[in-house]
Amino acid sequence: MTPESAFSTAEQAAVYRAIHERRDMRHFAPGAVDETVLARLFEAAHAAPSVGLMQPWRFLRIRDPQLRAAIIDLVGVERQATAQALGIRGGEFLNLKVEGVRDCSELLVAALAPDDGTVFGRRTLAHETALASVACAIQNLWLAARAENLGLGWVSLFDPAALAALLHLPPGARPVAILCLGPVAEFYPRPMLELAGWRAARPLADLVCDNRWPEEAL
Amino acid sequence: MTPESAFSTAEQAAVYRAIHERRDMRHFAPGAVDETVLARLFEAAHAAPSVGLMQPWRFLRIRDPQLRAAIIDLVGVERQATAQALGIRGGEFLNLKVEGVRDCSELLVAALAPDDGTVFGRRTLAHETALASVACAIQNLWLAARAENLGLGWVSLFDPAALAALLHLPPGARPVAILCLGPVAEFYPRPMLELAGWRAARPLADLVCDNRWPEEAL
């Protein structure tokens, strides 16, 4: 490898910093996202890997206040439905701040495009590989946002058919994430669901093994 | 935001560099991956977002040469099946270097764990949100690998049921990716499928829109 293509120690530290300090943000501060910054974030998303180079990600920037209001309502409905489904923990769930769709500066929707018939690398896993490509694009955008000192939250509290209808998605397209983006006062020092006592994270050692799935479930 | 939590311009550049210089590598060079580096890569994967903090990713490190040989065979079978499915472009496909399972220093498999019953954030999108979490973990590992000057390739040429059987995955678990990791002589300057003339990438402008899916399909 040529010296120019190797990352320096300082560059490595910055990449790891973004990875480890990225948070799923639900608390946003006032302020706009600069257009040139937003363009860089989309370029970062667009640099993601995709199966067979199909680039199945599509991004909708929600600028119409009425459309945002409709999305806020849709998330509100699913939040209540989730509380119901959670049973005994429903009340605790409703006390959590689980999304920032009302407060964030920019509201985006990431969608999976209709299947373009790509066969390369997805003969056996057509839907999964395309969806994974969209997720990788979102993760790129998320890490770039952290580096830009902007918060991002991935909201999955929605009925996909209802959101698809709101956004006029064509048949075969599928909304994957509502993304809340914008300035934040501070990043959570740890995942908010841990800080709030909702759930403990698992130790990495329990999730890695050699060769075969162990007898004791991973 | 406190000055300590803000990324510097140099740190931002390093994060974007990893995002834009990450490649899906199929050509590997001899040499081992240091154990401490591998541990950092797994920690990076484990720092990914996950729906409801379910952390559904599992990583299997393939160390048994016989098991690697069996995976190589499985990928070979799917490569031939893909060539068949591609019809007129099948011969061109077979001339491409599409994976490095034989040559890479470390062979990993990323898998989706059996559903743990998490409701938070996945009442309407149970499988998709869990799978997206695994994809985000893989993308973290990939970017960290680039920062460590190691190549990584995501191979999706496999029959998931056959690979699950080889790895003794329990019911409900699902292999998502075979990951080839290791030293490389050089990173491709652009995605290899573009360099090889297999397919052109799309301009970002065609993939972003305001509010609603446009009349002319995105």
Image (tube, coloured by chain):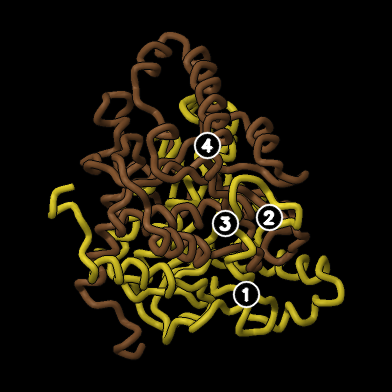
Chain colours: A yellow, B brown
The answer to whether any part of residue B173 appears in the image is yes
Estimate how packed mark 4 is, as few (under 14), some (14 to 19) or many (20 or more) residues with alpha carbons within 10 Å: few
Chain designation of label 2 = A
Residue that extends furthest to the top in the rendered view of this protein: B88
Alpha-carbon span between mark 4 and mark 1: 46 Å
Tags 4 and 3 on a common chain: yes
Which image quarter holds the C terminus of chain B?
top left
Is disc 2 placed on a helix, strand or loop? loop
Q: What residue type is disc 1 on?
A: Val
Please provide percent x and percent y for residue B78. 54, 23
Alpha-carbon span between mark 2 and mark 3: 19 Å
Chain designation of label 3 = B
Residue at the image position 54 percent from the left and 44 percent from the top: B62
Find out whether the residues at labels 2 and 3 contact each other: C-beta distance under 8 Å: no
Q: What residue type is disc 3 on?
A: Ser
- Nearest the camera: A129 or A212? A212
Estimate how packed mark 2 is, as few (under 14), some (14 to 19) or many (20 or more) residues with alpha carbons within 10 Å: some
Tags 2 and 3 on a common chain: no
Which image quarter holds the N terminus of chain B?
bottom left
Which circle marks residue B65 in the picture?
4
Alpha-carbon span between mark 4 and mark 2: 46 Å
Q: Nearer the viewer, mark 4 or mark 3?
A: 4
Residue at the image position 54 percent from the left and 74 percent from the top: A100
Is disc 3 placed on a helix, strand or loop? helix
